[in-house]
Image: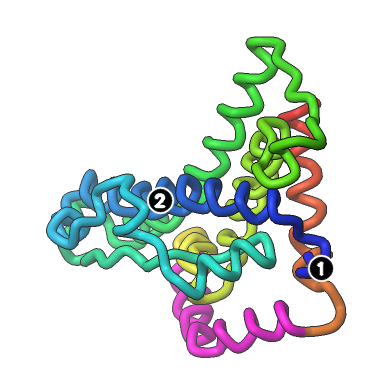
Amino acid sequence: MPFSGITLPILLARLLILMVALSVHEFAHAWMAVQLGDPTPRRDGRLTLNPRAHLDVLGSLMFLIAGFGWAKPVRWNPWNIRIDQRWGRLLVAASGPLSNLLLAALTAWGLQITGIIPLPRSGGIWVILPSPALLIREFIFLNVVLCFFNLLPITPLDGFEVATGLLPPSLAYHFRRLAPYGPFILLLLIILPVNLLGLILGPPVTATLRLLLG
């Protein structure tokens, strides 16, 4: 999204969403690793929903401006888990994006169950502060975007470990050799004048929003 199209209410809305969405995302990674037997995230103080334990300055700025970003990665040791490392890596990696999808789904379903329709408000204090309608809309939308963005099979995103876990071991071995090139590929996707990220993420994000919101 271009910076010129971002208003103060949207920035404030994204700041609030950032604190919740990324904290839950990283907490989910930590929780899953601990459940599988690794105490490292607990020792590092990551088994918490406190945003101060999870937020990364640059990743937070990207989230506010571009609609996606990242937090501090959760350290964990796959040698400590009680199940096969292949499936352990997959579960820990997938737990983050799925937690964002769950947040979006629970919010959307809550609106449907209660019958509440968040109406937009304009003027007055809503010129500065995000309205309830804006908060709810951005919360659902950005959590869905965060889910699918992180599922891209590119390092350092969660989708790389998810894809590696789903591939047959012989293919996974060769796929892992592409890991060093991941950050460069991701950077190209972001800076290229063609909106490749939008083309890639648009269909699943749109389909999910239609499913959740009807």
Question: Is the N terminus in the top left, top right, bottom left or bottom right quadrant?
Answer: bottom right
Helix, strand or loop status at disc 1: helix
Residue at image position (21%, 58%) is 41
Q: Tell me, for residue 23, which label it has, or none.
A: 2
Question: Residue tagged by mark 1?
Answer: 4
Look at the image and say whether residue 180 sits in the magenta stretch.
Answer: yes
Q: Depth check: 29 or 114 in front?
A: 114
Residue 150 image offset from top left, x and y in percent: 56, 61
Relative height, residue 116 to residue 21 (above, below): above
Q: Colour scheme in the image?
A: rainbow
Q: Which residue occupies the foreground of this view, 43 or 81?
A: 43
Image point (32%, 63%), residue name:
74
Q: Position of residue 9 (x, y in %)?
A: 69, 49
Say which quarter of the image contains residue 85. bottom left
**In the visual, does 165 lie left or right of 192?**
left
The image quarter containing residue 193 is: bottom right
Of marks 2 and 1, the one in the foreground: 1
Judging depth in this view, the residue of 21 and 184 nearest the camera is 21
Magenta stretch, residue numbers: 167-191
Label count reads: 2
Whether 103 is among the magenta residues is no
